[in-house]
Amino acid sequence: MRDKITGKFRYGTMSRRAALTAAALTTMAALAGCSGAGSGGAAEGDMALGAPEGAKVTVIEYASVTCSHCAVWQEQVWPQFKTRYVDTNKVRYIFREFPTPPADIAAAGFLIARCAGEDKYFDVIHEIMASQREWQAGVPPRSTLVRVATGAGLSEQQFQACVSDEAAIKALDARVKAGVDAGVNSTPTFLVNGTRVIDTSLESLSTAIDAELAKG
């Protein structure tokens, strides 16, 4: 089967269960309604940076490692956003996984990031996003994922076990379903204290964040 995004054969070394799950995730996302983007509360499995839980302002990003718009935001906006709000502990930034086509590759990327450990999770996510250019140039996605995994300290055997882990795949299913149930239907989707910010530029996000910070 040819992948419509990369023009390459789909990532073929995941378990059959994982591949079927990835297809189901894509279907769920496509069928999601447009009824808003959920709450800003904590959820099981959240990966966060910045201020601790209970912070005055929480920013949630729903994104995919295979989403080109997410990769652009990561490259162009994230460094300033991180410096202004995350490094200063002004906000609690939460990243939530929401696979987009090719969803089997996205799911594998998220599984690898989890296997790498909390201290390396964001590094792995960012590295996979930055590697989208490799796929456009014809590099097989599996090669990229193996490279990123080994760079994070996983052996190729651990990599294969990671992307075939039934419990981890089931947990990813649950996280994505929660996003779909909350009304998320595109990536990246940003929530500032539970309110969706349509314009994802630093200026627009800052306006929303600073207004929340200024509240008594």
Image (tube, grey):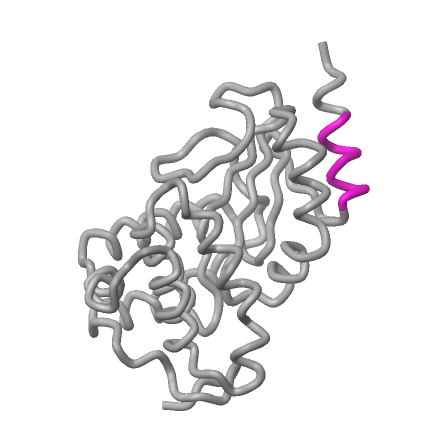
Q: Is residue 62 magenta?
A: no
Looking at the image, which residue is at 71% across and 50% down? Answer: 77
Residue 20 % position (x, y): 27, 71
Looking at the image, which residue is at 54% across and 63% down? Answer: 129
Q: Quadrant of the C terminus?
A: top right
Q: Is residue 17 found left or right of 30 in the rendered image?
A: left
Looking at the image, which residue is at 57% across and 64% down? Answer: 130
Span highlighted in magenta in the image = 202-210
Look at the magenta stretch and give its main secondary structure.
helix
Residue 78 % position (x, y): 66, 47
Residue 195 % position (x, y): 64, 35
Q: Quadrant of residue 107?
A: bottom left
In this orientation, which residue lies closer to the viewer: 6 or 142? 142
Residue 39 % position (x, y): 52, 34
Q: Is residue 77 found left or right of 203 in the rendered image?
A: left
Q: Quadrant of the N terminus?
A: bottom left
Q: Is residue 205 magenta?
A: yes
Relative to 1, say whether 187 is above or below.
Answer: above
